[in-house]
Image: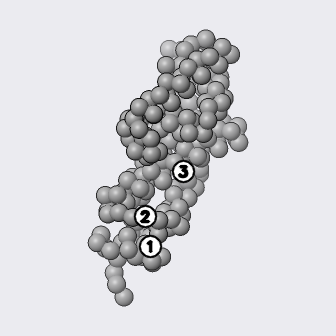
Amino acid sequence: MKKVNEANFIKRLKAKKEDALEYVIDTYLPIIKGIVSKVLLPIGQQESIEECINDVFLAIWNNAKKFDGNQDDFRKWICAIARFKAIDYYRKLQLDSPVSYDFIDFDAANSVEDEVLRIENRKELTKLLNKLSEIDRKIFMMKYVLGLSSNEIGEQLGLTRSAVDNRLHRGKKILNEKHKNFKLGGHLT
């Protein structure tokens, strides 16, 4: 029996060898957990983070045959899977469940009214983002939640940097036009 290692884990994963999946989990769990947590932690549902991580590894297992590249490409590939799964979970949780704001620490310098307005504005922003197309929502999430550059977003979505920047610009215009219901009347920049 062959033992899985750094040199053969991709080939063994494609052949559906369970030891290769265990190797991937042992090796890449910290980075996957970091990506998923960064996106989902503000929602405050730890069980959703764990569920999303499991779905990431299931997607890796189910789609391993589609991967074509070396170990560096594999790391980028699974990071992209983790980001998109986490963004999908984030969007689903924002739309399907009442959001719990128990995790928010109220700032003693702000009044309760200010904090309530901030929370309401966050809800309103989520509604506004849902008015964008799916690709534009992904771009906004990748840019403003994950902090990716326009080049990184373009690479992951198969778009040029200028196409990403144009979509961001048009999306901001759309959001600025629709922000009139925003409680504080601020601009989305």
Query: Which badge, 3 or 1, is on the more N-terminal residue?
Result: 1
In the image, 100: left or right of 104? right
Please name the amino acid that badge 1 sits on.
Lys
Q: Position of residue 139 (x, y in %)?
A: 50, 36
- 2 or 3: tag closer to the N-terminus: 2
Separation (CA) of disc 3 from disc 1: 21 Å
Q: Which residue is mark 2?
A: 67
| Label 3 crowd (10 A; few <14 / some 14-19 / many >=20) | many
Task: Give the structural element (helix, strand or loop) at label 3.
Answer: helix
Q: Residue at (37%, 70%) from the top-left corner?
A: 10
Of tags 3 and 1, the one toward the viewer is: 1
Q: Earlier in the sequence, mark 2 or mark 1?
A: 1
The 10 Å Cα crowd at callout 2, few under 14, some 14 to 19, many 20 or more, is: some
Q: Amino acid at mark 2?
A: Phe
Residue denoted by label 1? 14
Residue 138's x, y, as percent?
53, 39
Residue 168: percent from left, percent from top: 49, 28
Q: How far, Cα to Cα, is label 2 from label 3?
A: 17 Å
Badge number at residue 173: none
Report helix, strand or loop for mark 1. Answer: helix
Q: Is residue 27 visible?
A: no
Q: Give the colour scheme shown.
A: one colour
The quadrant of the picture occupied by the N terminus is bottom left
Q: Please give left or right for residue 46 compared with residue 162 in the image.
A: right
Which residue is the site of mark 3? 85
Q: Quadrant of residue 93?
A: top right
Q: CA distance from mark 2 to mark 1?
A: 8 Å
